[in-house]
Structures are given as structure tokens and as C-alpha cells.
Image: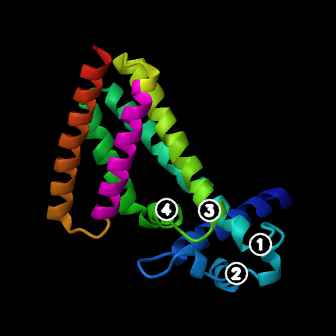
């Protein structure tokens, strides 16, 4: 392995270590650089070879979280292409992801309303990318005009994110109820968008 590959590997280890430190009681803003370095098994001074400070690491985590979610929904669309309900597959895929990667979603939820203006702006940017990508899909597949598709996707993303936050603290039975409820709510939004577009 050459030096550049080692550097990239160490950088990814720092990112993964920071994610692993997040839990129900610990947000990114309460994590210290020393904790991250210890978890990543590097010297604190080595941290600065990869990030200028802890805030740059935080913004990188937000970018990684947003990218992971967008890749996830692209995978959902591949599953949809093989047959099945768009809404059912999308909700199931989203909930599967956040339950198996709770810290990725937890970061977006917390920093969306956190104390750092830079983090809030970064999360809003990621959610906006997610919303716009869904709007493009709605326009392409369902022939809904873009202004209506943007309104529809904005409502859908907010609803699904709220359901995700609820599901993180729920047991298996409650998660199924949340999934069933949000699927019905998304169908209401979809039907409303179709009626509005046909006016």
C-alpha cells in the first residue's frame, strides 16, 4: 500500500471512529478531538494531517451522511425498477438503513437544529439535494410538473425524516405501525399532487 492509500485509509478510519462515538446521549458537538483520535488509534497530532480541526471533520460527516442517504435511495429505485410499489420500497429501504446505521441519521437529525450555523447549513444543503433528486424522479416517472414535484418531494422528505426519528426509539411492532402510517400519508401527498397537477 502506498502513502496516499494509507492516508486515505486513515482519514476514513477517523470518519468511522467519529460516527461510532455518537449515540443516544452524545452528539458530535460534545465529542473531542482526543476522543476521536483515541478511537481511531492515532496520535492527536496526526489528526491534523487529515482535517484542519474538529469542525471540518463534522462537516465531512454531514457530507458523508447525505451521500449515504442519496446512494440508498438510488438503490431503492433499482429495487423499484424490478417491480413493486415506489412508496413501499422507498419507506422500507429508508427505515432499514437508519435502523442499521443509526449514527449516520442521528447526526443529520441533531445537527439540523444544532448550535453550529455551519452544520445547520450543511445539513440543509444535504436535505435539499435529497429533495431535488426526488423531485427529478417524480417529474420523470410520474409526469408531474417540476414546481409541483418540488412541493411534493419537500413534504415527503420532511414526513419520512420525522418518521425515521420516531422509528429510532421504537420497538419492532411500533416500527411496523410507523411504516404503515407513513406509507398511507405519502399516498395522500402523491394523490394530492396528481389532482393538483391535473387542474
- Provide the secondary structure element on which disc 3 rests: helix
Q: Looking at the image, is 48 positioned above or below residue 78? A: below
Check if residue 159 falls in the magenta segment: yes
| Residue 147 position within the rendered picture, expressed as x and y whole percent measured from the top left | 45, 25
Q: Residue at x 17, y 63 (%)?
A: 174
Magenta stretch bounds? 148-167
Asked which quadrant contains residue 87, the reply is top left
Give the residue pinned by disc 2: 33
Q: Earlier in the sequence, mark 4 or mark 3?
A: 4
Describe the element under mark 2 as helix, strand or loop: helix
Is residue 31 found left or right of 80 in the rendered image? right
Q: Nearer the viewer, mark 1 or mark 3?
A: 3
The quarter of the picture where residue 176 lies is bottom left
> Which of the two marks, 1 or 4, is nearer to us in this view?
1
Which quarter shows the N terminus?
bottom right
Q: Which residue is mark 4?
A: 104
Q: Residues within 10 Å of mark 3 (few under 14, many from 20)?
A: many
CB contact under 8 Å: marks 2 and 4: no
Q: Which residue is mark 1?
A: 53
Q: Residue at x 73, y 65 (%)?
A: 56
- Are the residues at dot 2 and dot 1 in contact (C-beta closer than 8 Å)? yes
Q: Nearer the viewer, mark 4 or mark 3?
A: 3
Report the residue at 83% width, 57% height from top: 4
Q: Are marks 1 and 4 in contact (CB under 8 Å)?
A: no
Q: Give the percent coordinates (x, y) of residue 61.
A: 61, 61
Q: Quadrant of the C terminus?
A: top left
Q: Is residue 194 above or below residue 18?
A: above
Secondary structure of the residue carrying numbered label 4: helix
* Residue nearest the observer in this picture, 148 or 94: 148
| Residue picked out by circle 3 | 119
Amino acid at each position: 500500500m502506498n502513502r496516499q492509500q494509507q492516508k486515505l485509509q486513515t482519514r476514513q478510519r477517523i470518519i468511522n471512529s467519529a460516527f461510532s462515538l455518537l449515540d443516544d446521549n452524545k452528539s458530535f458537538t460534545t465529542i473531542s478531538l482526543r476522543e476521536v483520535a483515541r478511537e481511531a488509534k492515532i496520535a492527536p497530532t496526526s489528526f491534523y494531517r487529515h482535517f484542519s480541526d474538529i469542525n471540518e471533520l463534522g462537516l465531512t460527516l454531514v457530507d458523508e451522511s447525505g451521500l449515504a442517504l442519496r446512494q440508498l435511495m438510488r438503490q431503492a429505485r433499482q429495487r423499484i425498477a424490478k417491480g413493486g410499489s415506489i412508496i413501499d420500497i422507498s419507506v422500507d429501504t429508508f427505515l432499514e438503513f437508519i435502523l442499521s446505521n443509526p449514527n449516520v441519521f442521528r447526526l443529520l437529525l441533531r445537527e439540523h437544529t444544532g448550535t453550529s450555523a455551519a452544520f445547520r447549513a450543511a445539513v440543509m444543503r444535504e436535505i435539499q439535494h435529497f429533495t431535488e433528486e426526488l423531485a427529478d424522479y417524480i417529474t420523470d416517472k410520474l409526469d408531474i410538473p417540476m414546481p409541483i414535484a418540488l412541493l411534493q418531494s419537500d413534504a415527503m422528505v420532511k414526513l419520512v425524516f420525522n418518521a425515521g426519528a420516531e422509528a429510532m426509539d421504537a420497538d419492532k411492532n411500533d416500527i411496523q405501525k410507523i411504516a404503515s402510517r407513513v406509507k398511507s400519508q405519502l399516498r395522500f401527498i402523491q394523490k394530492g399532487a396528481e389532482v393538483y397537477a391535473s387542474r
